[in-house]
Image: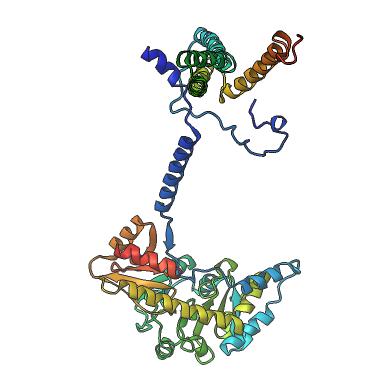
Amino acid sequence: MPRFRDYYKQFEAMDPEEVSAELRARRDEEKRRALSRVEPLDLTGAGWFEPPHPEAVNAATFALRRALNTYADVAPVREAVAARFGLEPEQVALGHGAGELLRALLPAAGDVHVGWPGWQPLPDLVTAAGGHAMPVPPDAPAGDAATIVLTSPSDTAGAVLPRAAIEALCEQAGHATVIVDEALAEFAEPGGGAATLVGELPNLVVVRSFSKGHAMAGLRAGAALGPPELVERLAPSGGLSAPAAAAVAWAVSDRGAEVAARRRAAAATLHEQLADGLEGTSFHAARAGMPFAWIASGDEDGPAISGRLATRQVFVAPGTLWGDRDHVRAQLRGPAGVERLISALTS
Amino acid sequence: MPRNDPTDTGGLFIGRRPGTAPLQYRTPPEEGSGRRRRADGMLAAGVLALETLVVLSLWGPQPLAWLWVGSQVDYRTDSVMLGITVAFIGLIGSMILTLMLATRLDHLWRLIRRAAGHDQRDGVLARIFMVTAIVAAIAFTFWLVVLQGPAPSMAPR
C-alpha cells in the first residue's frame, strides 16, 4: 500500500509558493556569486586611464566626416604645435606616434646610449633599427655614442631630467644626437621640459606623444621637435590622417592644455589617495604626479607583489621589465581603481 | 499544444499566460507502463464518478437525511425549534465534511490523471459543483411543479 501511494505521490506538483521560493533562492545564489566574481583590473598601462576628451573625439569625428578623399593639410597643425612650444614650424615634424618618430631617429648601426630606466620598448627599437642599445644612467656622461636616448619623465618613478642636466649632456655630447622622449611631459610640472631648449641646442630632439596625457594612443600621433635638418626627414610622406591631425590641433590648443592640466591635478590627487591608503603599511610609492605609481615594499620584492596582486585579479607591470626587482608599476585608474589597488596590496 | 499559443489566448499575452506555467515536480516522476497508465485512466474515471456522487449528495440525499433527523428530534423531544436547529447544524457540518472529502478526491483524481499520462494541472471540483447544482435545481423544479404539484392552497379541492 505505501508503495502504491508513493507511486501517485510522485505526481504531486510543487505549489506556486514553493516554486517561487525556489526561484528566489536560485536568484539570490546567482546574485551572491555575481558579487563574488572579481573582474580583472589591468594596471599595466602608463597613460591616462580615461578615453580621449570628448572634444578631441568630436574634432576627429568632424574631420572624419569631411573630405577624406584628399590628404589632410598638416601645415596648420604643425604651426599650432610649433606655437605651443615656442618654435618655428620647420622645427616640428608630425608622425604616427612617438614610437615611430623615435625609430626613425635611431641610427642603423653603432652604440646607442639608452638612459635607463626609460620607455620600456626603447632597447628593442634600437635593436630593430640596427643599433646596439647600451643602458646607462640618465645622467651618465655621453661617452662616444653617436646617439643618446633619454626618457623624461621616466616610465618608472616619473623622474624628470632637469633642464640643466640636458643642456650639459647636449654640450658634452658634441656631435652626438640627444633624443629626449617626453611622452609623459603633460604630467610633469609645466615649464620644465626639454622642448624649450630645442631652439638653443643643435643636437637635441624632443619627442612628444599624444598617447599618454591626451589618451589618444589609438589615433597614432606624435611630434618631434628639433633642428630642421634632423626632423625634416621624420615626417611621414602623406602626413597624418585627417582625424589624427584634427585631434592633435585640439590637443595643442589652449583648451587641450587646460584638459591636460586638469588630468595632471587629478593624477596628483590619485597619488595622494594611494599614499593615504598605504600609510602605516610596508608599501611606499614615488609621488611624481604620473598617471601610474612606482611601488615597493619593505617586506616583499617586486615579483612577489605582482604575483600576489595577480591572484586578486589586479595586474601590474613588474619592475623586472626595467631590471628592477624591488618595484612594480601600477596605473592609477581613477579613485575606484586606486581603492581596489590599495585593498589588493594591503589585504 | 502549449497553452500560451496565440490562438488560445487571443494574442493577448506575449509571454506565458498567467497560470499556465508547466508543472514542477520535486523529482521527475517515473511513469508506469502503457498498461498501468490505461488502468490509471480507468481508475481516474472511477474517482471522478465517486467525486460526482459525493458532490451530488449535497443537493438531495444530505438535506433529506437531515430533514429526517430533524423530524425525529422534533418527534422525540416535541420541540420544533430543536429539530430545525439540529437539522440545520447537521446539514452545514456534513456539507463541510463532504466538501473536504470532495477536495481530497479531486486532488487524488488529478494525481491519477497525471499518472495516466495527462497534463492535468487543475482539478474539476468547481465544475462538478456547478453542474450538479444545475442538475439538482432542474430535478427539484421538476419534482415541485410536475410530480408533487402546486402548493396545497392552490391544489384542486
Where residue A126 appears, as percent x and y from the top left, is 45, 69
Residue B152 as seen in the image, left or right of residue A138: right
Q: How many marks?
A: 0
Percent of width and height locating residue A152: 43, 80
Q: Is residue A173 above or below residue B80?
A: below
Question: Can you give x and y, in whole percent of width and height, for residue A220 in the image?
Answer: 58, 69
The answer, for residue A123, to whether it is visible in the render is no
Which image quarter holds the C terminus of chain A?
Answer: bottom left
Image point (70%, 67%), residue name: A64
Question: Most extreme residue toward the left, as rendered?
Answer: A299
Q: Position of residue A1 (x, y in %)?
A: 37, 11
| Residue that appears at 51% across and 11% down | B40
- Asked if residue A173 is positioned above or below residue B136 in the image, the reply reads below
Question: In terms of image quadrants, where is residue B48?
Answer: top right
Residue A283 is drawn in which quadrant? bottom left
Q: Residue at x 44, y 50 (%)?
A: A34
